[in-house]
Amino acid sequence: MNDTVTTALRRLRDADPATGHPDPHEPSARAMLDRVLHAPDAPVPARPRQTRRRLVLAAAAVAAAVSASGLVIVQPWSQGSRAVAYTVERQGDGSVRVSVKVDQIDDLERLNADLARANARTVFFEGQADCREKLRRHPDFVTQREPVPVGNGESVLNGIIVFPDPMNRELPFWVISPDRIPPGATLVVSFQKLYPVPDAENPNPPRDQTGLGWREDVVTEVPSCVAWQDPLAGKIGN
Amino acid sequence: MPTDDEDARERFEALFTDHYPELIRFAGRRVGRDSAADIVAGTFLIAWRRFAEMPADHARAWLYATARHVIANELRSRNRRERLSARLETTEAGWAEDASGPVGEQLRVQRVLAGLSAMDQEVLRLSEWEDLDVAEMAIVLGCTRTAAKVRLHRARRRFAARLLAAEQPVPNQRVTPPVVTRSRSQA
């Protein structure tokens, strides 16, 4: 850091708007603690884990597929507990196994935090139609191929991310190999939920037939959003 | 010998004591002093409910990430536009009135910070005001350590450049309008 930056940061620290030093022993703080501990629906928890979170594996729906921007659809899956909408698990060989419950993947901050803890070098985004940001793809991964549906491909991105058994709907999962991601790059996995399209035969398709379109990109800079146009929209349930 | 319940409560009380002050300050910066206690209470309530899931080695970052989420929910539940405009008006007034003293310096720096992108502001606040390290920031932001490090490095450079540029001898009409008028007429 040069002098200009050092000085600027010192001034920034001095400009901290926070004042005072709240005392955790003052009556209002102790009252807050008491309210938290005696909240009616707060169960007494067990001992916190000492190592990386290993969420209980749940029946999950995930898809995988193909190409530098592969797309995958996950087909109908059963509803389950929202507490296990995904799992992140670091494996002995350094790879990271991820499974996601299609219709319940809402808490991306939590998922991404777990991926960061697992050193997966991977960030998940929900695709946004109004995102104008262009992905800065790594030079080795600039080519895009046509989406390939589940079952037509098993490996994507030079082995960085694979879906070992795309037809296994009992326990589908991805395996990410962070050590194959080029230095300084990040794997971005973006997705969009795809809902069944009502038609004459099935005017009210059930929500549990939610599918998911996936895309993977290796980028040199993590974006703030990922633009998404769903070429597979409408294919679920048809 | 304490039971499991008592043991958990004792450990949670220690967690509360350790992090209550910084979380109050963190929330106060973002939602104001009046709402900070509500944010922190909500954060610790979630922490208590999910105490078993909390990573013991990253409890601080976990609390910040949760507090950030609670703040986002709080802000969403209010009329955001009205609050932002009210806050901006306050800032503008303070900047114009106190630009020469210590308060003016603080507002000047905060103004430069506010001119950066949301992500730049966030990493700088987490680093310089909350004193989070890169690993903690990565957890709070939900990104890799490498990404957090790169973001912080770039944000620091951009902030320093903006601060420097803001203090070049260019007349600032808003701060001292009479001086600006004179220098233009002289030119």
Image: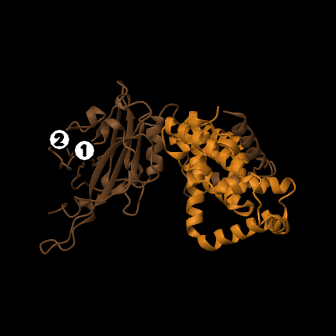
Looking at the image, the residue that sits furthest to the front is B187
Considering every residue shown, the one lying at the far top of the view is A93
Ranked by sequence position, the earlier of labels 1 and 2 is 1
Question: Mark 1 near mark 2, Cβ–Cβ under 8 Å?
Answer: yes
Q: Give the amino acid type for the residue marked by disc 1 in the picture.
A: Ala
Picture quarter with the N terminus of chain A: top right
Q: Nearer the viewer, residue A193 or B186?
A: B186
Mark 1 → mark 2, Cα distance in angstroms:
8 Å
Label 1 neighbourhood size at 10 Å, few (<14), some (14-19), many (20+)?
many
Q: Position of residue A199 (x, y in %)?
A: 16, 72
In the image, is residue B56 above or below residue A31?
A: above
Q: Which chain is brown?
A: A
Q: State which quadrant residue A186 falls in.
A: top left
Subunit that carries the residue with mark 1: A
Residue at coordinates 36% horizontally, 62% vertically from top-left?
Answer: A129
Q: Position of residue B185 (x, y in %)?
A: 81, 68
Q: Residue at horizontal 82%, vertical 57%? A: B104
Q: Which chain is orange?
A: B
Can you tell which mark lies on residue A153? 2
Percent position (x, y) of residue A190?
35, 50
From the viewer's perspective, tell me whether residue A158 is left or right of residue A40.
left
Label 2: few (<14), some (14–19) or many (≥20) C-alpha neighbours in 10 Å: many
Residue sitting at x 73%, y 63%: B34
Left or right: where does residue A136 sit relative to residue B85? left
Circle 1 sits on which residue?
A64
Vertical arrangement, residue A170 with respect to residue A91, above or below: below
Closest to the observer, B128 or A118: B128
- Quadrant of the rendering where the C terminus of chain A is positioned: bottom left
Outermost residue toward the left in this view: A201
